[in-house]
Image (spheres, grey):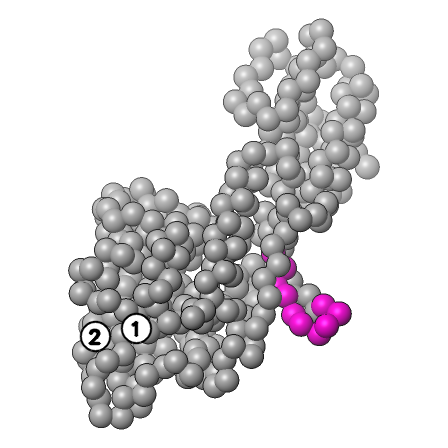
Amino acid sequence: HFGATDNIWRTGRTMISSIVLVEHETIIATIPNIIMEKKKRVFTLSYISNSFVFVIRERKRRVAAVILLVVVALVVLSSSRDNDNEFFDWPVEPEACNRPVRLGDEKDGGWWACADVLPKNENNEKNCVVYSYGIKDNYSFDVALSSSPHHCQVEGFDPSTYGLNSKESYNRLVQNGGGGYHDFGLGGATQTYGPGEVPFEWPGIGYLRKTNDDSWNLKTLTSTMSDLKHNHVDVLKVDVEGSEWAAMDDILTNSQRWSQFLVELHFNPADYSLKKKKKKDNTVVLRILQKSSFFFSSYRQRRENHFNLLGRLRNVSSLWKVDLNGNCLEVSLLVRK
């Protein structure tokens, strides 16, 4: 189903963005994922942001179109495969928590936690520690845990301008538990990033259309616990717009140092689809399906990295609650004893 408009051809499939025909003597192709050569004909397929771009030098356009259709068919078939290498199943275990509780707002800002392992400090003994990464302007969850009956010491972390604007009110509202606001964030390494240097993953700031305007300090969980002199965290909440992946290895290394892990996991819709599946025994699994073709090694490596981290997370914790919001998963986990 090709329609020609000048030198731009488009297909009816959303996965194909555009096909450009160029008849210059010299063609520069910077992404040589697939190159087919015959005599003076050069066909180059590259993959950029879920769009296929074909640069073709060929006087006989009919021949080019036929070859193009074959390549497109191969890519579509490879992308639609659903085998063990291309999806991750994560069992949902609601029985792991007997007393689920919603802390904070019912909508954005609130989180599901498990009261089974949540300390109850009626005498305000301050033996409960909470780390809350990602504050912005909604911290009802933090306030709920710093108040009665929990009286937790809630430490909030956010290097962004949005978070810094909330610093004064945040400190005032969580002071009962002895915690406070910190102007650094969570990262895969402890270092300072200059303006525009933070290695964001989707969705980042404004779905990767923006970056950090100021210098940001990011620290690993290990560094943060050392600086604050904490040996254990009762509740670890992470909502950092894609940066959770860089920090995940360190979080998993410290899995015996936290009791609950509440995290929003972000999956680029160009690469993944998410759904719940009910099995024959009525158990539910969360399926994370890789959509990108196996042709493209960068996407395959990213998938393998994400699936490896999820596998480790599945091994050390029980997923007892999950909410799907587009390509974001808000999950509540309890560490396995």
> Is 300 left or right of 209, judged from the image as shown?
right
**Numbered circle sitting on residue 19:** none
Q: Estimate the spatial distance between the alpha carbons at disc 2 and disc 1, rounded to whole Å.
A: 9 Å
Residue position for label 2: 179
Mark 2 / mark 1, whichever is N-terminal? 1
Figure check: 263 above or below 172:
above
Extreme-bottom residue of the structure = 122
Mark nearest the camera among 2 and 1 is 1
Question: Disc 1 on helix, strand or loop?
Answer: strand
Residue at horizontal 61%, vertical 9%? 25
Residue position for label 1: 130
Q: How many marks?
A: 2
User: In this picture, which residue range is highlighted in magenta?
Assistant: 279-288
In magenta segment, residue 263: no
Residue 1 falls in image quadrant = top right
Q: Is there a contact, CB below 8 Å, between mark 2 and mark 1?
A: yes
Q: Is residue 33 visible?
A: yes
Residue at horizontal 72%, vertical 68%? 279
Query: Where residue 224 appears, x then y in whole percent?
Result: 23, 59
Figure check: 89 above or below 153:
above
Circle 2: residue type: Gly
In magenta segment, residue 285: yes
Query: Where residue 135 appears, x then y in whole percent?
Result: 32, 67
**Residue placed most toward the observer, 5 or 22:** 22
Q: Residues within 10 Å of mark 1 (few under 14, many from 20)?
A: many
Circle 1: residue type: Val
Residue 54 falls in image quadrant = top right
Question: Disc 2 on helix, strand or loop?
Answer: loop
Figure check: 113 above or below 305:
below
Residue at horizontal 69%, vertical 42%? 79
